[in-house]
Structure formats: structure tokens, C-alpha cells
Image (tube, rainbow, N blue to C red):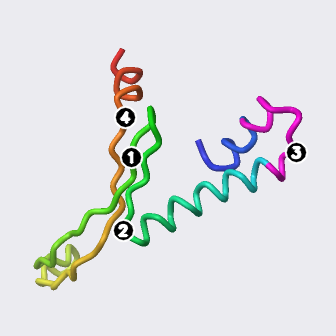
Amino acid sequence: MIKSELIQKIADKNPHLFQRDVELVVNTIFDEIITALATQNRVELRGFGAFSTKVRKPRTGRNPKTGESVEVEQKIVPFFKMGKDIKERLNS
């Protein structure tokens, strides 16, 4: 599902809301999650899961085209841990 499909589903289930308002709400939620992750904060949505960040240490990688060794710098990556409810629904 892509963001526009999510917005459309929410708008269809809530006919009293304008689609532009639903789009604003969805965009605001995503922006707040991104802002929290950018400041190294954890975002937990009960029953859904938790978003956090992890640090990948610097390492020596390999250029797959040339086989040459390349130094890869430390980076911060997003991480999602699904909640118990999602795990149960996926594995039922």
C-alpha cells in the first residue's frame, strides 16, 4: 500500500472528512515520526509497533563492480519492531 492508497481508505471510511484534511493528518503523522527519529527519539504506536534508530558502525566494504575495498562511514538507520498484535495476525 502506498501513501495515497492509505489516504483514500481513510477518506472512504470517514465520509464526513474531506480528503485534503485526511491527507494533512497523514502527512503530519509521518512528519512527526520523521522528526522524532531525526532527534534519536523512539516512536511507539501501541498495538502496531515501534520506530527507533540504530547506529551502524564504520566498516570496510567492497565495491561489487571492481572488488576494491571501500571505507563505509558510520550511519544512523531507521528500525521498526512490529507489535505483538501484528505478529499474531500475520502468523495466525
Report how far apart the C-alphas of labels 4 and 1 lie in the structure. Answer: 7 Å
**C-alpha separation, residue under disc 1 versus residue under disc 2:** 13 Å
What residue did someone put label 4 on?
83
22 lies left or right of 67: right
Task: Write the residue at 20% across / 73% down.
Answer: 64
Q: CA distance from mark 2 to mark 4?
A: 20 Å
Q: Is disc 1 placed on a helix, strand or loop?
A: strand
Identity of the amino acid at label 1? Ala
The secondary structure type at the circle numbered 4 is: loop
| Location of the C terminus (image quadrant) | top left
Task: Say which mark, if any, is on residue 40.
Answer: 2
Neighbourhood count class around disc 3 (C-alpha, 10 Å): few under 14, some 14–19, many 20 upward: few
- Residue 8 screen position, x and y as percent: 75, 40
Q: Amino acid at mark 4?
A: Gly
Tell me which numbered mark, 2 or 4, is placed earlier along the sequence.
2
The answer to whether 35 is drawn above or below residue 24 in the figure is: below
Quarter-wise, where is residue 82 in the image? top left
Does 59 sit above or below residue 87?
below
Q: Do the residues under discs 1 and 2 have CB atoms within 8 angstroms?
A: no
- Under tag 3, what secondary structure? loop
Q: Where in the figure is residue 23, as x and y percent of width and height?
A: 75, 52
- Choose the circle earlier in sequence order: 3 or 2: 3
Identify the residue at image location x=11%, y=83%: 69
Circles 4 and 1, Cβ within 8 Å, touching? The answer is yes
Query: Marks 3/4: CA distance?
Result: 30 Å
Q: Label 3, on which residue? A: 18
Q: Could you classify mark 2 by the number of other residues whose Cα lies within 10 Å: few (under 14), some (14-19), or many (20 or more)? A: some
| Magenta stretch bounds | 10-21
Q: Amino acid at mark 3?
A: Phe
